[in-house]
Amino acid sequence: MGIANRIFFKKKMGICAMTIALLCSVASCKPNTFDSVSKLWSHVKDEENGYHHQKMVGNVIYTLTYRPTDILVKQALGDNYTEFKVDSLRNKYGDYLYFNLSMSANDQELLNSKASDRNAFGAMVNQLAFGMAEKVHLIGQKRDTIPMADYSYPRMYGMSNSTNMLLVYPKDPRLLKGEFFHFTIEDLGFSTGEVGFKIPTKSLTNEPKLNFKV
């Protein structure tokens, strides 16, 4: 085989290898844009995708779920919207990270386990309503602690089997530099010790989106 033929053969093999690698990459990639909220949530709730985490310690179950920006955009849009409105809301909500935190003890709200002790019940109400910023922590790979921007705790008065809240953090560059970061929850009085989740950064930097059809 002449030099020219060998060079051509090597180039052809190289192109074939690149094509195969590209096809495999495309085949293995999961879609990142969804036509409905339900499809997006199904993707988020699949623990393999890095957005949904659950841990049971003793009789307490902790569930942490990332809430994509487009979920909040969809809620704020209503039925009639424009491309400008979508972009405006994405910019508004995109500066923050949103997490749904769910906690249950014996398949009930945390407060239910304190109902028989008036003092303990009052302390728990105060903790959940006003003090969770001191109990939950978002920590970067280099141990940078990101302060909470806000959180929402709707009282369910025994109508739910778990205590649920929305936690909001600034999208701090220090948090997204490493391969992962940590979310920790201090012991809330259930002898669990500190409970933590290790969250891959790439799941947030490449978060799923909704296909807004204007």
Image (spheres, helix red, strand yellow):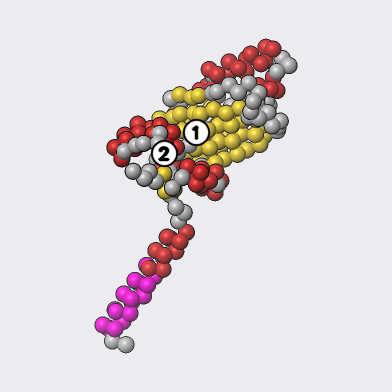
Find residue 70 and name its label.
Answer: 2
Report which quarter residue 187 is drawn in. Answer: top right
| Front position in the image: 2 or 156 | 156
195 vs 142, left or right, is: right
| Residue 11 drawn at (x, y percent) | 31, 74
Farthest residue, direction right: 116
60 vs 170, left or right, is: right
Q: Which residues are magenta?
A: 3-18
Q: Secondary structure at mark 1?
A: strand
Farthest residue, direction top: 119
10 in magenta = yes
| Residue 196 drawn at (x, y percent) | 57, 35
Residue at (39% x, 63% y) in the render? 22
The quadrant the N terminus occupies is: bottom left
- Give the answer, above or below, for where 9 lies relative to 133: below
Does residue 178 appear in this view?
Answer: no
| Amino acid at circle 1 | Phe
| Front position in the image: 132 or 36 | 36
| Amino acid at circle 2 | Asp
Q: Secondary structure at mark 2?
A: helix
